[in-house]
Image (spheres, rainbow, N blue to C red):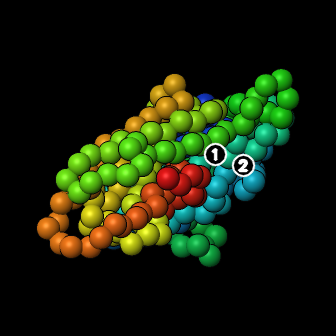
Amino acid sequence: AISYNMVATPNPVNEGAILTVNVTTTGVPNGTTLHASLNTGTTATSADVSAFQWAVTINNNVGVFAANIVGDLVTEGVETIQFILKPTISSTEVVATSNLVNINDTSNGGGGGGGVTYSFVLSPSSVTEGTSFTGLITTSGVANGTYLYVTADGSGSASADDFNAASWRVTINNNSGSFNGIAVADNITEGVETKVFYLRTGSYTGPLVATA
């Protein structure tokens, strides 16, 4: 028999943080794409989250997607959010409904809520091939344990191959996080190269919130 289950964590979640939604199934073939969206019967709307629908690929009866909860600087009180799962985007059949998650109004417009901010710098800002650098990320209003995502795919003459990695996942605690990278010594005469790094929320292709 085919079955579907969907669970969103953490609960509650702060504005500016990320909900991870895990989908588990039985009897669903590998590579199957399911479609998740907001349940419009809750108090949260599409303005409270960075997207309103997600494609979920199932492999080994497991799939996952991330929903970035927006820090909207509006005083709303606690809101609720829930997700529904369908076989296709246009289907009217709902095969699973997630748990109900409370959204804490941590970026409210008054009383020092302050909103969610992101800052991203590289140290040192100029490196020699074969040496390391550190990416320093500071935030405000971001929940402990939140993952942010860095990619070396911005503008500039350098390519992702000029670094020891093309992407990094950074955990934020106490509104700060960091990662280490290396500029690869490729034994090729190239002259001075440049590269812009992207900082995103939700996933490596999620909303862009800062550059370095």
Q: Which label is found at residue 48?
A: 2
The three-letter amino acid code for the residue at tag 1 is Ile
Mark 2 residue element: helix
Rendering coords of residue 145 (x, y %): 46, 32
Q: Residue at x 23, y 57 (%)?
A: 129
Confirm whether residue 142 shows in the render: yes
Mark drawn on residue 198: none
- The span from disc 2 to disc 1 (Cα, nearest Å) is 6 Å
Q: Position of residue 195 (x, y in %)?
A: 41, 63
Which residue sits at x=72%, y=49%? 48
Q: Is residue 11 visible?
A: no
- Disc 2 residue type? Asp
Give whichever of discs 2 and 1 has the lower sequence position.
2
Q: Does dot 1 land on a helix, a strand or a loop?
A: loop
Question: Viewed as shown, does residue 55 lie left or right of 170?
Answer: right
Q: Quadrant of residue 208?
A: bottom right
| Residue at the image point whose x is 58% and y is 36% from the top | 139
Q: Are marks 2 and 1 in contact (CB under 8 Å)?
A: yes
The picture quadrant where one finds residue 133 is top left
The front one of 124 and 38 is 124
Up the image or down, 32 lies above or below 14; here it is below
Residue tagged 1: 69
Task: Give the quarter of the figure containing the N terminus.
Answer: bottom left
**Farthest front residue in view:** 191
Which one is in front, 93 or 24?
24
